């Protein structure tokens, strides 16, 4: 469906007459024009806005073919003067239209004329793609390309300028400009620029621009155009459900996961609106299908080309999901789930943080909106956590999304999943690549490792045997599992679940190796903050016991893990937390109690040294806790706390922490 633009005009139309923009010949002229653009958002007077719009409009209408004179002064303008100019001009005019309603029609007309001219130029360049004047045509294509990129990025940031119908019209017009034939010509032209040896100052500048785009992680080409277009599509589909002000500086997926009340009601969707949503969904679907068809080819490209492709796919997935959640009749939920599962099963795609975060959060959102998918998603996410050799950030996202999905199911499902993950920590590892039958059954896999995505099947096996190639890979997976268990328990915000997870994890200490023990000790600190006082005190006692053992055994890795855990508690706890006083008293009383005889030592000197080392482990957590809570400035502090502080300070000094001692100098920052 194509909505006819009511403001459509001929390609020669200009709202301010037939005047043309003067050619920009010097960098000073360029900088003056950019400065005028930057002034547009702060103009409050209507007549000043109209005057500035009259000055800037001709430049926008010709920016797609503006050939700047080669100059060394333009080299400081990155990534290219053409993109920067198009972006600033678009931003300026859209800002004027947003701030001055009387200018909206004028600005809208100029945008349509600009896109009409881009389409005409693109069609002309496609028709000339087999001509002999390759270098000249290639530079024209590159000039048009950077102009469109600058325009699209600025339009996405100011999508609130257009009405709902105008945004759809904008998307369809840009889609016409970015035809498949034009994208092929773009790739061919940039290859010509890259490989040509023709002695030309202008060609040399464009070679430099191509290298600069590549060095900044945005290799110029068809994929960069599609990425910019898709994220304009994201802005368009997001504004279907939420106001623009709510989106500024925020992620639409995070908003959907945390603040569903902000979204517009969609109880009554007319047939025309439904057709429009279907059009947007089809555009997003085409992008996803195209990227999946070209997946093998993209694997041969550079890392940055792959990242652009993954960013494009992430934007297309968000757009399609926005359409589903706004009108589930306009898009196919089953196809969307298949795309998500395919991405989840591809380690290369899930290694990209942007795409991984979109896929994982989309699974949680679809499960929340279409609860029939929740059981299957609750099985494939643990499989990803256990098998995925991905970043800890993605594992944290997967864990929080799994917690969201599990809360849609029964309480038993949460407990079962935590135990399922926990049992892996006791299973040991094997060098066989194939998952065991237990793992397949537990996570809902068939013999070929495929998920039973649409089947109702509940786990029945109580243990998982971990499969990995190397010990290093196994340890990484074990660490992911520890992180996942803690994240699930924290996200559930249930003291009983927290107590279960903490108890189970602490029982796994000494079951794998010291590295995983350290990970459990550190992660347990975050878990304890979401539990009750009983679980919190239990962890503090364990920390105290393990600190003593770590000093006796000279286990620096263990001591470092405990210190990280204590520091995290000190950083996270605030005065209004019921756990704050418990922790403060624990640290002070622990310092006061140091100095008793230890069985492994028999002399007074050795005892003092051992106690001093125990006190060392408590100074930094106590310093952070007191500093963050500004304890020294509080006038209503309990007399009991004052007494503990005084006694602990006395014991600190007794054990050699003074200004004139080596130990005191070493910990001077903490003591202050």
Image (cartoon, rainbow, N blue to C red):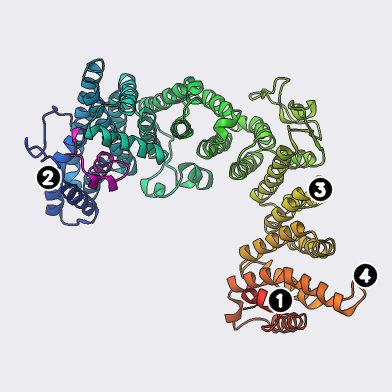
Of callouts 4 and 2, the N-terminal one: 2
Locate residue 213: give its quadrant: top left
Report the magenta residues as a range: 65-85
Residue annotated with mark 4: 599
Alpha-carbon neighbours of circle 3 within 10 Å: few (<14), some, or many (≥20)? some
The percent position of residue 272, horizontal first and vertical second, equals: 33, 26
The answer to whether residue 398 is left or right of residue 54 is right
Judging from the image, what secondary structure is the residue with disc 2 in?
Answer: helix
Is 73 magenta? The answer is yes
Camera-side mark, 1 or 3: 1
Q: In whole angstroms, how far apart are the C-alphas of marks 4 and 2?
A: 88 Å
Camera-side mark, 3 or 4: 4
Residue 663: which disc? 1
Residue 411 in sight here: no
Residue annotated with mark 2: 54
Of callouts 3 and 4, the N-terminal one: 3
Of callouts 1 and 4, the N-terminal one: 4
The percent position of residue 86, horizontal first and vertical second, equals: 24, 40
Of callouts 2 and 3, the N-terminal one: 2
Of callouts 2 and 1, the N-terminal one: 2
Judging from the image, what secondary structure is the residue with disc 3 in?
Answer: loop
On screen, residue 571 above or below 510? below
Q: In whole angstroms, how far apart are the C-alphas of marks 1 and 4?
A: 24 Å
């Amino acid at each position: 469906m194509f909505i006819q633009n009511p403001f459509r005009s001929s390609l020669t139309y200009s709202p301010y007459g037939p005047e043309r923009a003067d050619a920009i010949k010097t960098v000073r002229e360029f900088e003056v024009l950019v400065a005028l653009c930057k002034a547009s958002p702060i103009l409050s007077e209507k007549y000043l806005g109209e005057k500035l719009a009259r000055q800037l409009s001709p430049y926008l209408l010709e920016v797609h073919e503006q050939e700047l004179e080669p100059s060394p002064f333009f080299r400081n303008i990155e990534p290219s003067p053409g993109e920067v100019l198009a972006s600033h001009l678009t931003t300026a005019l859209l800002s004027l239209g947003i701030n001055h309603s009387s200018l909206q029609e004028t600005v809208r007309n100029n945008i349509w004329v600009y896109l009409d001219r881009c389409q005409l130029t693109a069609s002309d360049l496609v028709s000339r793609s087999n001509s002999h004047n390759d270098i000249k045509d290639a530079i024209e294509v590159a000039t048009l390309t950077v102009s469109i990129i600058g325009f699209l990025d600025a339009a996405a940031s100011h999508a609130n300028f257009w009405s709902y119908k105008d945004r759809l019209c904008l998307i369809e017009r840009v889609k016409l400009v970015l035809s498949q034939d034009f994208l092929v010509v773009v790739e061919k032209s940039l290859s010509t620029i890259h490989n040509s040896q023709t002695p030309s100052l202008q060609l040399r500048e464009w070679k430099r621009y191509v290298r600069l785009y590549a060095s900044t992680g945005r290799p110029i080409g068809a994929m960069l155009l599609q990425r910019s277009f898709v994220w304009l599509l994201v802005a368009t589909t997001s504004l279907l459900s939420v106001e623009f002000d709510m989106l500024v500086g925020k992620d639409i997926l995070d908003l959907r996961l945390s603040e569903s009340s902000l979204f517009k009601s969609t109880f009554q969707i007319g047939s025309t609106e439904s057709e429009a949503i279907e059009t947007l969904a089809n555009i997003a679907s085409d992008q996803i299908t195209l990227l999946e068809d070209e997946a093998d080819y993209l694997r041969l490209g550079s890392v940055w080309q792959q990242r652009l492709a993954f960013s494009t796919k992430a934007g297309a997935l968000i757009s399609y999901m926005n359409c589903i959640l706004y009108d589930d009749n306009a898009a196919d939920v089953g196809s969307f789930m298949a795309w998500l599962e395919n991405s989840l099963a591809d380690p290369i795609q899930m290694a990209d943080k942007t795409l991984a975060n979109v896929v994982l959060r989309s699974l949680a959102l679809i499960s929340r909106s279409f609860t029939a998918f929740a059981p299957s998603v609750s099985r494939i996410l643990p499989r990803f956590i256990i098998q995925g050799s991905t970043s800890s950030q993605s594992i944290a996202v997967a864990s929080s999304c799994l917690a969201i999905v599990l809360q849609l199911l029964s309480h038993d499902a949460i407990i079962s999943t935590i135990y399922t993950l926990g049992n892996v920590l006791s299973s040991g590892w094997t060098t066989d690549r194939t998952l065991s039958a237990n793992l397949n059954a537990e996570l809902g896999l068939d013999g070929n490792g495929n998920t039973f995505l649409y089947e109702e099947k509940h786990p029945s096996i109580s243990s998982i045997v971990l499969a990995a190639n190397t010990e290093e890979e196994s340890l990484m997976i074990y660490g992911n599992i520890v992180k996942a268990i803690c994240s699930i328990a924290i996200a559930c915000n249930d003291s009983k679940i927290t107590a279960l997870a903490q108890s189970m994890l602490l029982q796994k200490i000494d079951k794998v190796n010291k590295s995983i023990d350290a990970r459990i000790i550190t992660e347990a600190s975050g878990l304890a903050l979401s539990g009750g006082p009983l679980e919190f005190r239990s962890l503090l006692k364990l920390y105290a016991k393990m600190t003593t053992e770590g000093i006796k055994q000279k286990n620096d890795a263990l001591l470092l893990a405990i210190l990280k855990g204590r520091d995290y508690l000190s950083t996270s706890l605030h005065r209004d937390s019921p756990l704050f006083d418990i922790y403060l008293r624990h640290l002070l009383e622990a310092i006061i109690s140091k100095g008793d005889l230890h069985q492994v030592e028999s002399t007074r000197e050795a005892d003092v040294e051992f106690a001093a080392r125990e006190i060392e482990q408590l100074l930094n957590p106590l310093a952070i806790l007191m500093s963050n809570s500004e304890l020294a400035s509080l006038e209503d502090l309990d007399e009991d706390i004052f007494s503990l502080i005084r006694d602990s300070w006395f014991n600190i000094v007794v054990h050699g922490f003074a200004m004139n001692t080596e130990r005191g100098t070493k910990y001077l920052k903490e003591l202050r």
